Image (cartoon, rainbow, N blue to C red):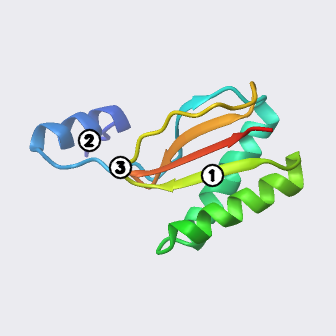
């Protein structure tokens, strides 16, 4: 029996024309300190799993938890197929994907 590595499996699926869906969090950009980044990612994953059918509730849950933990003025966008241009406090931005095409953007501005 052959054992395939994850990279080989992905290449095989792409060659077969199947869509690859990543179930782990994929960070596209982050300038947070490592501790804040880890907590924010865990919070985003938990909120998106808990409110899989309602992006607004997931965003509200993330925003309220970030406000409590790291101070007020956090903003969160959860959804698919959106673009953005924002101003934010340095070292307070996380842009990630979860569950394939669900994007989460979290930032703080005063």
Q: Relative to the observer, which residue lies in front, 28 or 88?
A: 88
Q: Earlier in the sequence, mark 2 or mark 1?
A: 2
Which residue lies under the disc numbered 1?
A: 76
In the image, 61: left or right of 4?
right
Q: Between label 2 and label 3, give the one nearer the viewer.
A: 3
Q: Secondary structure at mark 3?
A: loop
Q: Earlier in the sequence, mark 1 or mark 3?
A: 1
Q: Secondary structure at mark 2?
A: loop
At 56% across and 68% down in the image, what residue appears?
Answer: 56
User: What is the spatial separation of the Cα atoms under label 2 and label 3, in whole angstroms?
Assistant: 38 Å
Q: Tell me if label 1 and label 3 are in contact, CB under 8 Å.
A: no
Residue 55 at what x, y percent from top left? Answer: 51, 66
Residue 2: give its label.
Answer: 2
Q: Tell me if label 2 and label 3 are in contact, CB under 8 Å.
A: no
User: What is the spatial separation of the Cα atoms under label 2 and label 1, in whole angstroms?
Assistant: 44 Å
In the image, 75: left or right of 7?
right
Q: Secondary structure at mark 1?
A: strand
Residue 19 position (above or below residue 26): below
Which residue lies under the disc numbered 3?
A: 81
């Amino acid at each position: 029996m052959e054992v395939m590595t994850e990279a080989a499996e992905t290449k095989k699926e792409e060659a077969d024309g199947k869509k690859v869906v990543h179930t782990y969090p994929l960070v596209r950009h982050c300038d947070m300190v490592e501790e804040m980044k880890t907590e924010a990612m865990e919070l985003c994953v938990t909120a998106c799993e808990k409110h899989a059918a309602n992006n607004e509730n997931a965003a509200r849950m993330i925003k309220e938890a970030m406000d409590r933990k790291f101070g007020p003025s956090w903003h969160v966008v959860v959804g698919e197929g959106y673009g953005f241009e924002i101003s934010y406090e340095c070292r307070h931005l996380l842009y990630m994907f979860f569950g394939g095409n669900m994007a989460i953007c979290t930032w703080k501005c005063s």
